Amino acid sequence: MSVLLRRRDFAMFWLADVISVIGDWMLMIGLPIYVYVLSQSTLATSIMFMVNVLPKLALGSLGGVFADRWDRRRLMIGANLLQALCLLPLLFVHSVGSLWIVYVASFASSVIAQFFIPAANAFLPTLVNEDELTAANSMNALSNNLSRLIGPPLGGIIAGWFGLTGLIWSDLLSFLLAAILIALIATRPGQRVKPALSEQRVNPWLKVGREWAEGMRLIWREHNVFVVLVLFGISSVGEGVISTLFAPFVSKAFHGGAAEMGWMMGSQAIGGLLGGLGVGWVASRIVPTRLLGICAFVFGCIDLIIFNYPAFFSGLLIPLGLFVLVGIPTAGMFSGYMTIIQTGTPDEYRGRVFGALFALGGLMTLIGASVAGLLGDRLGPVLLLNIQGGGYVLAGVLAWFWLRHEHKANSPAASEATAEPISVS
């Protein structure tokens, strides 16, 4: 991993991600609380989260088309600057009557993110060699957990000193710093294939539709890419379930509140840091498909132990240790998903595939959250959370037997890298 960070372009990309996500975590500490205090309504708070999910469903896949069309580096710079602008209207939210500004700003920021996310994941393979992708993706998992550890307490300090205004300006600054760091990256994408003259005369929206359909056909053709999307969909249902039922579970099983939830989330982030470091070490020793299968299976098994532990034992110390443990395979799953898609997809299609991946994830997360919301009180959180843990176990087993585990030297990404080397200015 230290070798990757010594590469200037990757280090700029990684640091931009760390700074931006820390800013997001800081704002996530204060904004939901501020909305609730103003409105005294859980519905008003939930709407804020819903408007963040809707663009994923409507634009997640479409954003990938433009991530394949445009210069991804410039797209990421522009997206960071636009997301910074989206924060400014929040400075004028002072009453229930102005909460609509929060919803509009959150929706607009989420729309922009649907173009940034596939571009960033598609851009990463241009910064490292193919055999370093698993380690590079584990570094991204590590940065997310590092941000998760730093952002909330830092956000709490800033909120205490400067209030919501301080959090808004801090997040805005993080976007500006991220844009500057990405602008300093010297790597440029390979030359895009220009459409034929007859194609240039086609209706632009029809062309977008054709390009989107080409990406979907590639997903269907590439066995491992298709399987990864199915497995990601299965696990995303579980994410929707646990995001809805985690608080009731902590309350009923451990008689805990916000503090206990914070300890558990922090413990899992520590495990994620350890996992990020560990994946970097095993990256050269295990192929990504095996890594995904093992980590998903282990993650599901530890989840099942956590959810059923309170039925047999009491105390919080051992569950906190289990949350550290469950964070470790999380990094392996993330790295496995990303690396399989990056190595199994030609560069000119990566944006569309990642767009489809995250759009599917958003849809399945919404389904999981809806099922949990409708059945949580009737069936209880433990039963549904066991189904969530079982889903990860199933995903691990399917990954082990359904994915093709050979590490192909003639993968689309490898062939493309041979035909068209990365140009560095």
Image (cartoon, helix red, strand yellow):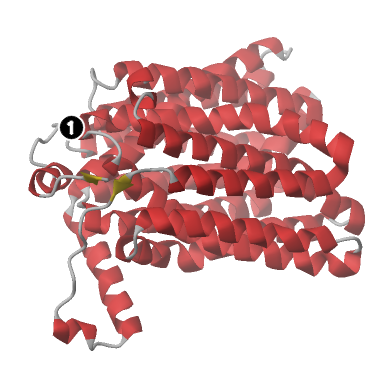
Residue in the foreground of this view, choosing between 411 and 318: 411
Q: How many marks?
A: 1
- Assess disc 1: are there few (<14), some (14-19) or many (≥20) residues with their C-alpha within 10 Å of its C-alpha: some
Would residue 112 appear left or right of 331 to someone viewing this image?
A: right
Please name the amino acid that badge 1 sits on. Answer: His
Would residue 385 appear left or right of 287 to someone viewing this image?
A: right
Element under label 1?
Answer: loop
Asked if residue 401 can be seen in this view, the reply is yes
Q: Give the percent coordinates (x, y) of residue 13.
A: 43, 39
Would residue 325 appear left or right of 170 to someone viewing this image?
A: left
Quarter of the image for the C terminus: give it: top left
Would residue 399 appear left or right of 175 to someone viewing this image?
A: left
Residue in the picture at 23% in, 58% down: 348
Residue in the foreground of this view, choosing between 186 and 207: 186
Q: Give the percent coordinates (x, y) of residue 188.
A: 29, 50
Residue in the foreground of this view, choosing between 106 and 172: 172
Residue sticking out furthest to the front: 425
Q: Is residue 65 above or below residue 249?
A: below
Quarter of the image for residue 131 reads: top left
Q: Which residue is mark 1?
A: 405
Asked if residue 302 can be seen in this view, the reply is no
Q: Is residue 221 above or below residue 387?
A: below
Quarter of the image for the N terminus: give it: top left
Residue in the foreground of this view, choosing between 422 and 244: 422
Q: Give the percent coordinates (x, y) of residue 281.
A: 33, 16
Q: Is residue 271 above or below residue 363?
A: above
Residue in the picture at 42% in, 32% down: 11
Q: Give the percent coordinates (x, y) of residue 394.
A: 38, 35
Residue in the picture at 25% in, 87% down: 202
